Image (cartoon, rainbow, N blue to C red):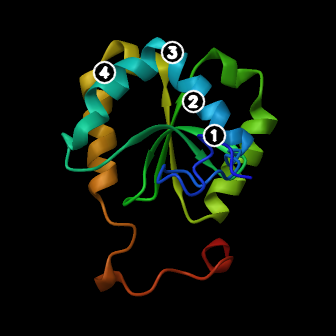
Amino acid sequence: MILPGTGRGTGEAGGGALPQKAPPEVYAARRLRKAMTLPEVLLWQRLRGKTSGIKFRRQHPIGPYVVDFFAGEAKLVIEIDGASHDARQDYDAARSAYLTNKGLRILRVAAADVLRDPDGAAASIAALAALPLHQPAAGPPPRAGEDQE
């Protein structure tokens, strides 16, 4: 028996399948987008909408972590460091190692710098995001561990 409104054979969308449950990082990102700090809001107002030619995402999940801002094309993570980061240095170090191993660059910006000059902070971030990760004329990038000799 087909129940009314289940989508089976009624021409309704959905097909009656159970909804997919999002990973916990997605829920955390949604919650963080609603509770952004003042420096994050000021920076987001300046980075959003590809005004700098680069698309930024706010409170973006990457693996088990949620980063403040992310420019996918530039493989750049922007973290706004405020007072809360002082108390969780071990967590930040583990997160930075994870993101670096994924091939991402991380830029940490002090919240005080964003509050003092949000336009300047946004311009600096956009300029860094516009730089390519690798300049072909410089040759191939070093293999893991070669640059530490």
**Which residue appears at 33% of the width and 52% of the height?**
129
Q: Residue furthest front?
A: 1
**Which residue appears at 60% of the width and 44% of the height?**
61
Disc 3 to disc 4: CB gap under 8 Å: no
Q: Position of residue 34 (x, y in %)?
A: 52, 19
Total marks drawn? 4
Q: Tell me if mark 3 has few (under 14), some (14-19) or many (20+) residues whose alpha carbon lies within 10 angstroms of its own.
A: few
Q: Tell me if mark 1 has few (under 14), some (14-19) or many (20+) residues whose alpha carbon lies within 10 angstroms of its own.
A: some
Helix, strand or loop at label 3? It is loop
Residue on which disc 3 sits: 37
Inter-mark Cα distance, 4 to 2: 24 Å
Inter-mark Cα distance, 1 to 2: 6 Å
Q: Nearer the viewer, residue 23 or 35?
A: 23
Disc 3 to disc 1: CB gap under 8 Å: no
Q: Position of residue 94 (x, y in %)?
A: 77, 47
Residue on which disc 4 sits: 118
Residue 15 horizontal side relative to residue 71, left or right: right
Q: Position of residue 35 (x, y in %)?
A: 55, 16
Closer to the chain start, of discs 3 and 2, is 2
**Could you say which disc has been placed on residue 26 in the image?**
1
Q: Which image quadrant is residue 135 in?
A: bottom left
